[in-house]
Amino acid sequence: MSISAKGPQPAPRHRPISTVRISTVALLGIVVAVVIPAGAAALVLSGSIDEQHLPQAIQITGPVTKVVIADDDGSIHVTGDPAMSGVSGTADLKWRGLGNGRPPLEVRQDISDGVLTLTKNCLRGTDCGGADIDIRVPPNVAVQASTSNAGIEAYHIAGGVDLSTENAGITANELGSGDAKFHTSNASIDVGFVGAPKEIRADTSNASVTIATDGRTPYFDNVDTSNGETKKDNAQNRYADNVINVSTSNGSVTIR
Protein backbone atom coordinates (compact mmCIF):
# COMPACT_ATOMS: atom_id res chain seq x y z
CA MET A 1 0.00 0.00 0.00
CA SER A 2 1.36 3.34 -0.89
CA ILE A 3 0.45 6.52 0.96
CA SER A 4 0.67 9.69 -0.98
CA ALA A 5 2.15 12.61 0.91
CA LYS A 6 -0.05 15.67 1.30
CA GLY A 7 1.28 18.97 0.18
CA PRO A 8 1.14 22.12 2.35
CA GLN A 9 -2.46 23.13 3.25
CA PRO A 10 -3.66 26.74 2.90
CA ALA A 11 -4.20 28.60 6.17
CA PRO A 12 -7.87 28.51 7.26
CA ARG A 13 -9.81 31.64 6.54
CA HIS A 14 -11.14 33.46 9.63
CA ARG A 15 -14.05 35.90 9.46
CA PRO A 16 -12.65 39.31 10.30
CA ILE A 17 -13.95 40.99 13.45
CA SER A 18 -16.47 43.67 12.56
CA THR A 19 -15.14 47.18 12.92
CA VAL A 20 -16.77 49.08 15.81
CA ARG A 21 -17.65 52.59 14.80
CA ILE A 22 -18.77 55.19 17.31
CA SER A 23 -20.17 58.38 15.93
CA THR A 24 -19.15 61.72 17.32
CA VAL A 25 -22.67 62.30 18.69
CA ALA A 26 -22.74 58.96 20.50
CA LEU A 27 -19.29 59.57 21.92
CA LEU A 28 -20.35 62.95 23.26
CA GLY A 29 -23.40 61.30 24.79
CA ILE A 30 -21.20 58.86 26.66
CA VAL A 31 -18.98 61.64 27.91
CA VAL A 32 -21.97 63.69 29.06
CA ALA A 33 -23.47 60.71 30.86
CA VAL A 34 -20.22 60.25 32.75
CA VAL A 35 -19.77 63.91 33.61
CA ILE A 36 -23.36 64.87 34.61
CA PRO A 37 -24.39 63.67 38.10
CA ALA A 38 -27.15 61.13 38.19
CA GLY A 39 -29.74 63.53 39.69
CA ALA A 40 -29.12 66.21 37.09
CA ALA A 41 -29.18 63.66 34.29
CA ALA A 42 -32.58 62.45 35.48
CA LEU A 43 -33.77 66.05 35.52
CA VAL A 44 -32.61 66.59 31.94
CA LEU A 45 -34.26 63.38 30.78
CA SER A 46 -37.56 63.92 32.53
CA GLY A 47 -37.84 67.63 31.75
CA SER A 48 -39.59 68.25 35.09
CA ILE A 49 -38.61 70.72 37.77
CA ASP A 50 -40.01 70.47 41.29
CA GLU A 51 -42.33 73.19 42.49
CA GLN A 52 -40.79 75.31 45.23
CA HIS A 53 -42.66 77.05 48.07
CA LEU A 54 -41.68 79.85 50.42
CA PRO A 55 -44.01 81.68 52.85
CA GLN A 56 -43.93 85.48 52.94
CA ALA A 57 -45.45 87.27 55.92
CA ILE A 58 -48.10 89.94 55.37
CA GLN A 59 -48.34 92.25 58.37
CA ILE A 60 -49.80 95.76 58.27
CA THR A 61 -50.81 97.75 61.34
CA GLY A 62 -54.03 99.71 61.14
CA PRO A 63 -56.06 101.51 60.32
CA VAL A 64 -57.03 99.85 57.03
CA THR A 65 -60.28 100.74 55.26
CA LYS A 66 -59.79 98.97 51.91
CA VAL A 67 -57.70 96.07 50.62
CA VAL A 68 -56.76 95.80 46.95
CA ILE A 69 -55.17 92.53 45.77
CA ALA A 70 -53.64 92.16 42.29
CA ASP A 71 -52.53 88.56 41.82
CA ASP A 72 -52.41 85.93 39.08
CA ASP A 73 -51.93 82.17 39.08
CA GLY A 74 -52.58 82.24 42.82
CA SER A 75 -55.61 81.80 45.05
CA ILE A 76 -56.99 84.52 47.33
CA HIS A 77 -58.60 83.92 50.73
CA VAL A 78 -59.86 86.89 52.78
CA THR A 79 -61.58 86.62 56.18
CA GLY A 80 -63.07 89.45 58.23
CA ASP A 81 -62.02 89.29 61.89
CA PRO A 82 -63.45 91.71 64.51
CA ALA A 83 -60.19 91.48 66.46
CA MET A 84 -58.20 93.00 63.59
CA SER A 85 -57.45 96.68 63.01
CA GLY A 86 -54.75 96.00 60.45
CA VAL A 87 -54.08 93.10 58.12
CA SER A 88 -52.25 89.88 58.93
CA GLY A 89 -51.56 86.71 56.96
CA THR A 90 -49.21 84.97 54.57
CA ALA A 91 -48.48 84.65 50.88
CA ASP A 92 -47.35 81.20 49.79
CA LEU A 93 -44.88 81.98 47.01
CA LYS A 94 -44.67 79.09 44.54
CA TRP A 95 -42.51 78.65 41.49
CA ARG A 96 -40.68 76.00 39.50
CA GLY A 97 -36.92 75.97 39.90
CA LEU A 98 -33.88 74.03 41.02
CA GLY A 99 -34.48 74.74 44.68
CA ASN A 100 -31.83 77.39 45.30
CA GLY A 101 -34.17 79.04 47.80
CA ARG A 102 -34.33 82.39 46.00
CA PRO A 103 -37.90 83.00 44.84
CA PRO A 104 -38.34 84.85 41.53
CA LEU A 105 -41.36 86.72 42.91
CA GLU A 106 -42.68 88.59 45.91
CA VAL A 107 -45.89 90.19 47.14
CA ARG A 108 -45.46 93.94 47.48
CA GLN A 109 -47.27 95.58 50.38
CA ASP A 110 -48.10 99.28 49.98
CA ILE A 111 -50.43 101.31 52.17
CA SER A 112 -51.63 104.84 51.52
CA ASP A 113 -54.52 106.71 53.17
CA GLY A 114 -55.85 103.50 54.68
CA VAL A 115 -55.79 101.56 51.39
CA LEU A 116 -53.57 98.47 51.45
CA THR A 117 -52.44 97.17 48.05
CA LEU A 118 -50.96 93.70 47.74
CA THR A 119 -49.37 93.09 44.35
CA LYS A 120 -47.62 90.03 42.97
CA ASN A 121 -44.30 91.27 41.63
CA CYS A 122 -41.94 89.27 39.39
CA LEU A 123 -38.28 89.76 40.32
CA ARG A 124 -36.88 87.71 37.44
CA GLY A 125 -38.68 87.32 34.12
CA THR A 126 -42.41 87.47 33.60
CA ASP A 127 -43.42 83.83 34.09
CA CYS A 128 -42.34 83.76 37.72
CA GLY A 129 -44.98 81.60 39.39
CA GLY A 130 -47.85 82.53 41.68
CA ALA A 131 -48.72 83.53 45.23
CA ASP A 132 -51.55 82.02 47.27
CA ILE A 133 -52.66 84.86 49.54
CA ASP A 134 -54.48 84.20 52.83
CA ILE A 135 -55.21 87.22 55.05
CA ARG A 136 -57.39 88.37 57.95
CA VAL A 137 -58.81 91.89 57.81
CA PRO A 138 -61.19 94.13 59.77
CA PRO A 139 -64.78 93.15 58.84
CA ASN A 140 -65.79 96.64 57.72
CA VAL A 141 -63.12 96.99 55.02
CA ALA A 142 -63.91 96.90 51.32
CA VAL A 143 -62.12 94.19 49.36
CA GLN A 144 -61.14 94.39 45.70
CA ALA A 145 -59.33 91.27 44.49
CA SER A 146 -58.32 89.93 41.10
CA THR A 147 -56.40 86.85 39.99
CA SER A 148 -56.50 84.20 37.26
CA ASN A 149 -56.58 80.41 37.05
CA ALA A 150 -57.22 80.21 40.79
CA GLY A 151 -60.18 80.63 43.10
CA ILE A 152 -61.23 83.46 45.39
CA GLU A 153 -62.88 83.09 48.80
CA ALA A 154 -64.18 85.88 51.05
CA TYR A 155 -65.97 85.60 54.39
CA HIS A 156 -67.44 88.05 56.93
CA ILE A 157 -66.78 91.18 54.83
CA ALA A 158 -69.23 94.05 55.37
CA GLY A 159 -67.61 96.86 53.42
CA GLY A 160 -68.31 95.59 49.91
CA VAL A 161 -66.48 93.22 47.57
CA ASP A 162 -65.32 93.29 43.96
CA LEU A 163 -63.90 89.84 43.13
CA SER A 164 -62.64 88.80 39.70
CA THR A 165 -60.86 85.73 38.35
CA GLU A 166 -60.81 83.44 35.30
CA ASN A 167 -61.23 79.67 34.99
CA ALA A 168 -61.83 79.24 38.71
CA GLY A 169 -64.69 79.59 41.17
CA ILE A 170 -65.70 82.33 43.57
CA THR A 171 -67.10 81.52 47.01
CA ALA A 172 -68.22 84.11 49.55
CA ASN A 173 -70.43 84.02 52.62
CA GLU A 174 -71.59 86.19 55.52
CA LEU A 175 -71.21 89.31 53.38
CA GLY A 176 -72.63 92.63 54.56
CA SER A 177 -74.41 95.55 52.94
CA GLY A 178 -71.60 96.88 50.76
CA ASP A 179 -72.14 96.54 47.01
CA ALA A 180 -70.94 93.19 45.68
CA LYS A 181 -69.54 92.29 42.26
CA PHE A 182 -68.33 88.88 41.12
CA HIS A 183 -66.82 87.93 37.78
CA THR A 184 -65.29 84.70 36.51
CA SER A 185 -65.49 82.31 33.55
CA ASN A 186 -65.89 78.55 33.18
CA ALA A 187 -66.53 78.22 36.92
CA SER A 188 -69.33 78.76 39.40
CA ILE A 189 -70.19 81.64 41.70
CA ASP A 190 -71.66 80.78 45.12
CA VAL A 191 -72.27 83.71 47.50
CA GLY A 192 -74.35 84.51 50.57
CA PHE A 193 -75.33 87.68 52.45
CA VAL A 194 -76.37 88.73 55.92
CA GLY A 195 -76.68 92.35 54.76
CA ALA A 196 -78.58 93.95 51.90
CA PRO A 197 -76.36 95.52 49.21
CA LYS A 198 -78.00 97.98 46.84
CA GLU A 199 -76.52 95.97 43.96
CA ILE A 200 -75.36 92.38 43.65
CA ARG A 201 -73.79 91.54 40.28
CA ALA A 202 -72.56 88.09 39.23
CA ASP A 203 -71.19 87.22 35.78
CA THR A 204 -69.76 83.92 34.56
CA SER A 205 -70.01 81.46 31.68
CA ASN A 206 -70.48 77.72 31.34
CA ALA A 207 -71.27 77.43 35.05
CA SER A 208 -73.92 78.08 37.67
CA VAL A 209 -74.63 81.07 39.90
CA THR A 210 -76.09 80.76 43.40
CA ILE A 211 -76.97 83.81 45.48
CA ALA A 212 -78.44 83.68 48.99
CA THR A 213 -79.86 87.05 50.11
CA ASP A 214 -80.58 88.04 53.71
CA GLY A 215 -84.06 86.56 53.22
CA ARG A 216 -85.90 89.79 54.05
CA THR A 217 -84.90 92.52 51.62
CA PRO A 218 -86.88 92.60 48.33
CA TYR A 219 -84.85 92.75 45.13
CA PHE A 220 -85.50 93.27 41.47
CA ASP A 221 -84.00 90.11 39.94
CA ASN A 222 -82.51 90.76 36.51
CA VAL A 223 -81.34 87.38 35.22
CA ASP A 224 -79.85 86.56 31.83
CA THR A 225 -78.97 82.92 31.15
CA SER A 226 -79.18 80.29 28.43
CA ASN A 227 -79.32 76.52 28.53
CA GLY A 228 -79.88 76.53 32.26
CA GLU A 229 -82.67 76.50 34.82
CA THR A 230 -83.60 79.67 36.74
CA LYS A 231 -84.99 79.49 40.28
CA LYS A 232 -85.90 82.68 42.13
CA ASP A 233 -87.13 82.06 45.66
CA ASN A 234 -86.04 85.34 47.25
CA ALA A 235 -88.22 88.32 48.18
CA GLN A 236 -88.89 90.11 44.88
CA ASN A 237 -90.21 93.50 43.85
CA ARG A 238 -89.73 94.88 40.37
CA TYR A 239 -89.83 98.41 41.79
CA ALA A 240 -87.30 97.74 44.54
CA ASP A 241 -84.28 99.98 44.99
CA ASN A 242 -82.10 96.90 45.44
CA VAL A 243 -81.19 94.92 42.32
CA ILE A 244 -79.56 91.59 41.51
CA ASN A 245 -77.93 91.32 38.07
CA VAL A 246 -76.90 87.85 36.95
CA SER A 247 -75.45 86.77 33.61
CA THR A 248 -74.29 83.29 32.63
CA SER A 249 -74.57 80.69 29.90
CA ASN A 250 -74.90 76.92 29.98
CA GLY A 251 -75.54 77.05 33.71
CA SER A 252 -78.34 77.35 36.20
CA VAL A 253 -79.18 80.38 38.33
CA THR A 254 -80.53 80.10 41.88
CA ILE A 255 -81.54 83.11 43.99
CA ARG A 256 -83.01 82.58 47.39
Image (cartoon, rainbow, N blue to C red):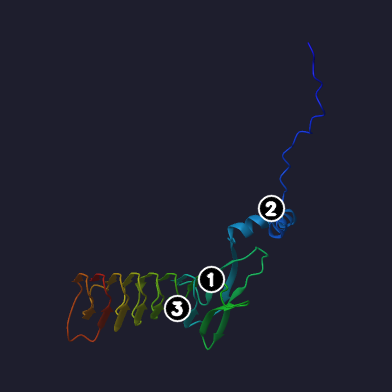
The residues tagged by marks 2 and 1 sit, at their Cα atoms, a distance apart of: 32 Å
Which x, y percent locates residue 18? 71, 45
Foreground label between 2 and 1: 2
Going by the numbered disc 3, the residue's amino acid type is Ala
Is 1 placed above or below 13 here?
A: above
Amino acid identity at mark 1: Ala
> Could you tell me residue 254's position as x and y percent?
24, 70
Picture quadrant of residue 154: bottom left
Tell me the SS state at disc 2: helix
Q: Position of residue 238 (x, y in %)?
A: 17, 84
Labelled disc at residue 145: 3
Which residue is label 2 attached to? 38
Residue at x-position 54% and y-position 79%: 119
Is 223 left or right of 205, judged from the image as shown?
A: left
Residue type at the position of mark 2: Ala
Residue tagged by mark 1? 131
Nearer the N terminus, badge 2 or badge 3? 2
Depth check: give the residue in front, 12 or 37: 12
Tell me the CA gap for discs 2 and 3. 45 Å
Q: Is residue 61 left or right of residue 230?
A: right
- State the residue at coordinates (61%, 57%): 45
- Rendered view: 124 above or below 37: below
Q: Is residue 3 left or right of residue 65?
A: right
Q: Earlier in the sequence, mark 1 or mark 3?
A: 1
